[in-house]
Amino acid sequence: MAEKKTWKGGRLGPFHLGKRYKNVGVDLSRLYAAHNTDTGNAALVVMPGARTDSEPGESWSVRATSQAEPPYFALEVEQAPASGRLPDLSNMLDLLTSAVECLEKNEEARAHLTGGSVSAWTRWMGRMKRLLRSPRGLLVAGLTALALGALLLPRFSGESEGPDSEARASAGALAVAEVQAPVLVDLDGSGVPTITYPLPVRPFSDQAKAPCFPKSGEVEINGGCWVELAKRPPCYDDQAEHQGKCYMPVSAKSHEKKRREPHSVQP
């Protein structure tokens, strides 16, 4: 009977699967290099196949630790089924041990597991690439292109060539190149909504610029005004991560409102 079509990778639970390690034995079926999409940590993922009887019967989450000085080994259970059976835990550990043993002489696997976690920027870019490859991402990109075309076409279609045409074209190109923030905080509202992407090196085009308003909870980072959130990394998908904290950009419109508000004059 023909073997089932090989699954070629992608998202599996919290893991994004990458390279598949071939020729690792029937017992392991499919063995992949992977990364945890929330933490960026390197991982190995084993997918049992039709020719194996090692499918998990229960859902466990454990962490293995070893320390050189003072020496010890530890198995920490993070999540276990209420009626969990230790033979199932033992089978899981045996399978993962076999996976590591099969890769003992594989330099590429060693580099993957010891290379450290993937940065927040790389994880965010990976999410964007996967989104653009999906039908939903293509739809969003198409609608965005149509919206930009509808905004720019009337501006340029009626313009004749003249001394300032080059300047207008440059301004139009700059407007297209500017990147807007995915979500903004308007501090005039009744509350601050809870926006992971790395904090950019310069402010967004629609973000409030320095000087900021510290009394309103704003902080200045890289020339832009931000609000620090109580949430700590890993931040949510629509929040900026910077030096162990989560932030949201302040709306430029909120600054315009503040500047228009009357201020009392001290005698």
Image (tube, rainbow, N blue to C red):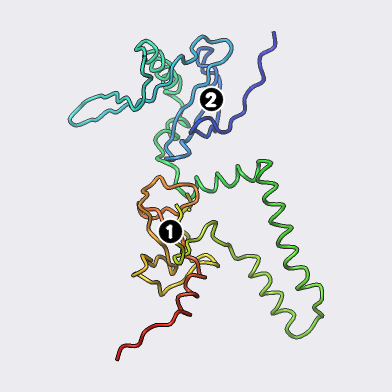
The residue lying toward the viewer, choosing from 104 and 209, is 209
Q: Mark 1: which amino acid?
A: Gly
Q: Residue at x 53, y 25 (%)?
A: 21
For this view, does 153 lie left or right of residue 36? right
Residue 227: percent from left, percent from top: 40, 61
User: Which labelled disc corresponds to residue 105?
Assistant: none
Judged from the image, the secondary structure of the residue bearing numbered disc 1 is loop
- Image quarter where the N terminus lies is top right
- Which residue has dot 1 on it? 191
Please tell me how crowded label 2 is: few (under 14), some (14-19), or many (20+) other residues with Cα within 10 Å: some
- Which residue has dot 2 on it? 21
Q: Residue at x 41, y 39 (%)?
A: 115
Q: Mark 2: which amino acid?
A: Tyr
For this view, does 239 lie left or right of residue 18? left
Distance of label 2 from label 1 (alpha carbons): 50 Å
Residue 127: percent from left, percent from top: 55, 44
The residue lying toward the viewer, choosing from 154 and 197, is 154
Instruction: From this view, report whether residue 94 is shown above or below residue 176.
Output: above
The residue lying toward the viewer, choosing from 237 and 266, is 266
